[in-house]
Image (cartoon, grey):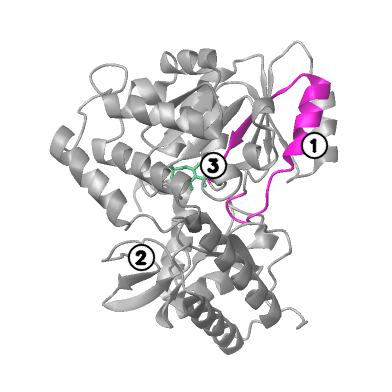
Amino acid sequence: MSKLLRAKEASLARVYTTKEKGIYPYFRPISSSQDTEVDIDGKKVLMFGSNSYLGLTNHPKVKEAAKRAIDKYGTGCAGSRFLNGTLDLHLELERRLAEYVGKEAALCFSTGFLANQGALSSLTGRNDYIILDELDHASIIDGSRLSFSKVIKYRHNNMEDLEAKLSALPQSSIRLIVVDGVFSMEGDIARLPEIVALADTYGASIMVDDAHGLGVIGVNGAGTASHFGLTDKVDVIMGTFSKSFASLGGFIAGDKDVIEYLKHSARSLIFSASMTPSAAASVIATLDLITTEPEHIQRLWDNTNYARNLLKEAGFDTGNVSETPVIPIYIRNEESVFRITRMLQDEGVFVNPVVPPAVQPDATLIRFSLMSTHTFSQIETAIDKLTETFTRAGIPLKQKI
Ligand code: PMP
């Protein structure tokens, strides 16, 4: 092995072993659009692993908007927002987003990862504190590290632990609590009312990463802060376009001053090329649909409730924490998660395997996620296949109810 990888042998061995066993579950090439059914290896596979919650990546109006943007603006912006890469389209999108989430201003980045990285690395400094839920997304963790602030984690959604951590910090420092609004792997919602109360008591600030909340919960899908009626109490809202918004990119929304500051200090904005015209235009088209056609969100919830009940009736261990279209099915053994994922794909059902570091080692799971465009019949088929596959693999379902 290359001397460069001397310290990485164990992690690479894990990849090779999984491949040798024929259960490697990553980088599966899809040769169709990301819809409720996809083509893999010449076979139709039901998609229950997508983040396209509203199923809009294939919507004619969204595709048409993307095509029109290519005709007008070309395929790329050839520069960063800071210099030659700002289009009127980006500004329109930012106005729309600010209005949508109820903040003064918004700023778009080329991915959600870069939005978190850019905001978190520049908002707080060396003498400040960033306080994270232990299950926050990787981009929050990486952005926090780049800030040189002290990073403190509290136990997942555990408000006693958050208070214990907050109360020990000096009031003279900036203390920024950062949470996923909807947690990406287990589908539960941050306990925002209590977080806001604690932030008020201790003088801390709050940032919510709403990658999985936007388009799903809140008024017209405006996200977690809206869901709790606490938009004014959250300092910064982050979102991504790679999920409900059927595109690619991300944004930060907040007070005008915060956004003005980020425009001149977020390195992932200043030193990286801007969102493509087609990506920006498709988000605007998606916002139009979400705000004028409530049936997209309604169908997502009908599907979510239907699937959740069927999974529970079948006896799967769904953990009772998910309140959203992301439903975890706990297996609690990494190799079994990989094996089941592979077997399910062979049976025509795509799900995502979730193992450490995304979750704790005793919480490995299959992530089953719903889209607005699934039919009840597709959901029934997938859950029947799950039951058959678990039985064949000898993985016990939790007690039947
Ligand atoms: N935050 C969360 C909670 C996410 O789940 C993701 C994407 N998995 C991101 C941020 C990054 O978003 P993007 O895909 O736009 O880079």
Q: Residues within 10 Å of mark 1 (few under 14, many from 20)?
A: some
Q: Which residue is mark 3?
A: 138
Mark drawn on residue 194: 1
Question: Is 28 on the left or on the right of 252, as rendered?
Answer: left
Front tag of 1 and 2: 1
Q: Residues within 10 Å of mark 3 (few under 14, many from 20)?
A: some
Asked whether disc 1 touches disc 3, contact meaning CB atoms under 8 Å apart, the reply is: no
Question: Is 382 on the left or on the right of 32, as rendered?
Answer: right
Q: What is the C-alpha distance between the residues marked 2 and 3?
A: 22 Å
Q: Of the residues under marks 1 and 3, which one precedes in the sequence? A: 3
Mark drawn on residue 28: 2
Q: Secondary structure at mark 1?
A: helix
Quadrant in the picture for the C terminus: bottom right
- Highlighted range, magenta: 183-211
Q: How many marks?
A: 3
Nearest the eye: 228 or 345: 228
Residue 97: % across, % down: 46, 32
Q: Is residue 113 visible?
A: yes
Give the residue type at disc 2.
Arg
Residue 321: % across, % down: 72, 58
11 vs 204: above or below: below
Q: Of the residues under marks 1 and 2, which one precedes in the sequence? A: 2
